[in-house]
Image (cartoon, rainbow, N blue to C red):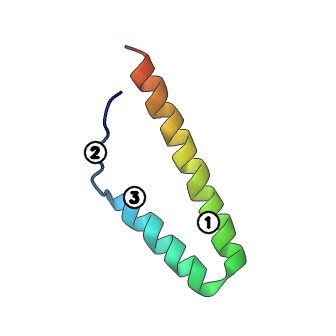
Amino acid sequence: MKKYTYTPKPLFYALVGSLILSALFSPVIFGIVGGGWFFYALINLGNRINKDNEC
């Protein structure tokens, strides 16, 4: 199995910033923002797995 190394990208900082800001202002908005980022990560992971299996 291939080992992944992670280097933070600008999108990572957008994720952290949006989660912190939404947590400060409203728990309901935090749930929506967190859910949106979760689905984005899930789709991204699925695409990576598909790309690895194509070879």
Give the x, y percent position of residue 54: 42, 16
- The mark tally for this picture is 3
Give the x, y percent position of residue 30: 64, 73
Give the x, y percent position of residue 7: 27, 53
Judged from the image, the secondary structure of the residue bearing numbered disc 1 is helix
Q: Residues within 10 Å of mark 3 (few under 14, many from 20)?
A: few
Q: Which mark is residue 5?
A: 2
| Residue at x 56%, y 44% (from the top left corner) | 42
* Circle 3 residue: 11
Inspect the image, locate mark 1, and give the three-letter code of the amino acid beneath it: Val
* Circle 1 residue: 33
Judged from the image, the secondary structure of the residue bearing numbered disc 2 is loop
1 or 2: tag closer to the N-terminus: 2
Give the x, y percent position of residue 14: 43, 66
Query: Vertically, is 20 above or below 14?
Result: below
Residue at the far right in the pictured view? 28
